[in-house]
Image (cartoon, rainbow, N blue to C red):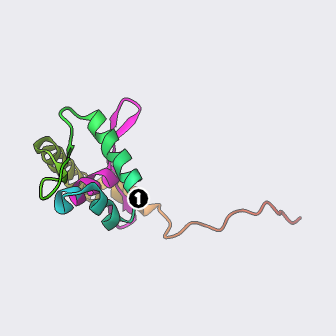
Amino acid sequence: MKIGPLWLKLQIACGEALALGPGKADLLDAIAAQGSISAAARGMGMSYRRAWLLVDEMNRCFDPPLVETLRGGGLERGARVTETGLAVLDAYREMEREAAAIAERPAYARLRAHLRTSPRAPDTGDATS
């Protein structure tokens, strides 16, 4: 999330794996809305394989899994975010809202006082004497 020049990115680790971050949270939202990993992936402009790998990593990091796939035909197919998945997503979004309050803290104001509006041009290394 971007607040002025401050970018906040909450990432939840599970060992060396990234259990949850902003992209995975958005994917969970999309799966909940679309009822399918493939439709969620299409809506987010990513491949089904990439979405499946992200879901698999989340499911391996949480117990019970956050997303379950539904096999079969008719209305009982696709994927759904489990109750645990909805609870984890809700907690993550709450953490994002709380983290956004950092922009109101004095430390951020002090840091921002020294922040340029854009980076200087790179030093080419050519020194003239």
| Residue situated furthest front in the rendering | 73
Q: Quadrant of residue 111?
A: bottom left
Residue 90 position, x and y percent, is 15, 50
Residue 36 position, x and y percent, is 23, 57
Question: 102 or 40, which lies in front?
Answer: 40
> Which residue bears the numbered disc 1?
47
Figure disc tally? 1
**In this picture, which residue range is highlighted in magenta?**
1-30
Image position of 109 with respect to 57: above or below: below
At 42% across and 62% down in the image, what residue appears?
A: 113
Label 1 amino acid? Ser
| Residue situated furthest right in the rendering | 129
At 28% across and 63% down in the image, what residue appears?
A: 39
Residue 72 in sight from this viewpoint: yes
Image position of 14 with respect to 102: above or below: above
Residue 45 position, x and y percent, is 38, 66
Question: 64 or 3, which lies in front?
Answer: 64
Q: In which quarter of the image is residue 2?
A: bottom left
For the C terminus, which image quadrant?
bottom right
At 31% across and 67% down in the image, what residue appears?
A: 43
Residue 116 position, x and y percent, is 50, 66
Q: How busy is the neighbourhood of tag 1: few (under 14 within 10 Å), some, or many (20 plus)?
A: some
For the N terminus, which image quadrant?
bottom left
